[in-house]
Amino acid sequence: MAFLYCEILWLKLVILIVRSNQHLGEPIS
C-alpha cells in the first residue's frame, strides 16, 4: 500500500515538472 502511495506521489511530481516545462517552453506573447 505504501508503495502505491509513493508511485502516486512520483506521478504527481513528474506531471508537475512536465507542465512547468511546457509552460516555460511557450513563447511569451
Image (cartoon, rainbow, N blue to C red):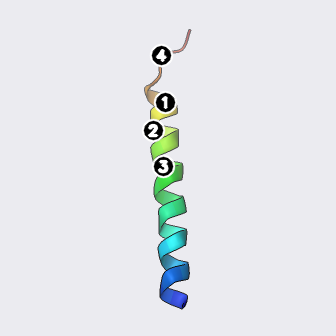
Q: At label 1, which amino acid type do we have?
A: Leu
Query: Up-down: is 4 above or below 18?
Result: below
Q: Residue furthest top?
A: 29
Provide residue 20's location: percent of width, then percent of height.
52, 40
Q: Secondary structure at mark 2?
A: helix
Instruction: Give yes or no for contact between labels 1 and 2 (Cβ–Cβ under 8 Å).
Output: yes
Q: Secondary structure at mark 1?
A: helix
Q: Callout 1: 10 Å neighbours few (<14), some, many (20+)?
A: few
Q: At label 4, which amino acid type do we have?
A: Pro
Which badge, 3 or 1, comes first in the chain's sequence?
3
Q: At label 2, which amino acid type do we have?
A: Asn
Q: Residue furthest bottom?
A: 1
User: Which residue is identified by label 1?
Assistant: 24
Q: Callout 3: 10 Å neighbours few (<14), some, many (20+)?
A: few
User: Which residue is identified by label 3?
Assistant: 17
User: Which residue is identified by label 4?
Assistant: 27
Q: Which residue is pictured at 54% across the width and 89% down the height?
A: 2
Which badge, 4 or 2, comes first in the chain's sequence?
2
Query: Up-down: is 4 above or below 29?
Result: below
Q: Which residue is pictured at 51% across the width and 79% down the height?
A: 6
Q: CA distance from mark 4 to mark 2?
A: 12 Å
Which badge, 3 or 4, comes first in the chain's sequence?
3
Provide residue 23's location: percent of width, then percent of height.
52, 31
Query: Up-down: is 18 above or below 14?
Result: above
Quadrant placement of the C terminus: top right
User: Which residue is identified by label 2?
Assistant: 21
The quadrant where residue 18 appears: top left
Query: Up-down: is 15 above or below 20?
Result: below
Q: CA distance from mark 1 to mark 2?
A: 5 Å
User: Could you tell me how many numbered marks the image carries?
Assistant: 4
Q: Which residue is pictured at 47% across the width and 22% down the height?
A: 26
